[in-house]
Amino acid sequence: MDFETALHVLIELAGAIWVTLALAAATLPLGFVLAAIATWARASRRRILRMIASAYVLSFRSTPLLVQIFVLYYGLSQFAWLRESPAWIVLKEPFACAVIAMSLCTGAYTAEVMRGGLAAVPKGAIEAARALGLSPLKVLFLVTVPIAARRALPAYSNEIVVTLKATSLASTITVMELTGVAKDLMSQTFAVIQVFCMVAAIYLAINTILILALRSLELYLTPLHERPRSRSEIAWKKAPA
């Protein structure tokens, strides 16, 4: 690949980065809301809500995301009544279908992350808050949620990175994000290795920045007595008086 071709490839891929980031930015909040609703429903006293939420989580965690995208984009178009409904304004768009499918999928996985975070909250902390006379709402937002968020953040950070990488599947329904543009560039330049190595490098750079930011957030939310100590501090404390 000569310099001019490489520059053309980089410019095209740079433009596709925003589509990839837009997919992830639209998917993650929607998935988080769905996960919160599913988590609430699974903890509900009503059996029907628990069954629906459990079925949702099981279904979307047990089937491939690619299949879910195909069913939503290609499968729903088979129904004439749906094509004539107002919902078709959204469902006919490949970007919207990709966001919906990915949101449903990441929502199921995030619901499990939330369930694990809530299960990690010490019962003693909740009982102590109740003993102090805090209302159930204050116990939830002042005790349960902060502790659960710290416990669930490492697993949720992984889900964020996985979701960002999963945006590449949107190219299968003509969404021109990084992978979709790379496929077109590959057919134009026939430089398969060079083009996809550039794509891999872009994903690596984005995810590295994201991982470092999430680790900083995790460290910020960690109480001081639970934070890992520096080597110099450990050596100073171990030194004889």
Image (cartoon, helix red, strand yellow):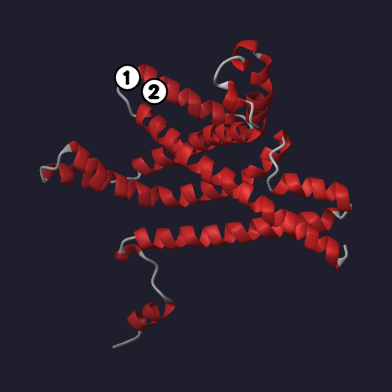
Quadrant hosting residue 82? top right
What x and y, as percent, mark residue 110? 47, 39
Q: Which residue is mark 1?
A: 46
The quadrant of the picture occupied by the C terminus is: bottom left
Count the marks.
Answer: 2
The quadrant of the picture occupied by the N terminus is: bottom right
Quadrant hosting residue 62? top right
Q: Residue at x 88, y 65 (%)?
A: 2
Looking at the picture, does residue 149 appear above or below residue 216? above
Report whether residue 163 is seen. no
Looking at the picture, does residue 64 appear above or below residue 10? above
Q: Which residue is mark 2?
A: 50
Quadrant hosting residue 84? top right
Looking at the picture, does residue 234 appear above or below residue 86? below
Kind of element beneath mark 1? loop
What numbered label is drawn on residue 129?
Answer: none
Query: Distance of mark 1 from mark 2, alpha carbons?
Result: 7 Å
Kind of element beneath mark 2? helix
Seen from the viewer's position, the closer of residues 180 and 70 is 180
Q: Residue at x 79, y 63 (%)?
A: 7
Q: Residue at x 78, y 57 (%)?
A: 9
**Given contact means CB atoms under 8 Å apart, are the residues at marks 1 and 2 in contact?**
yes
Q: Amino acid at mark 2?
A: Arg
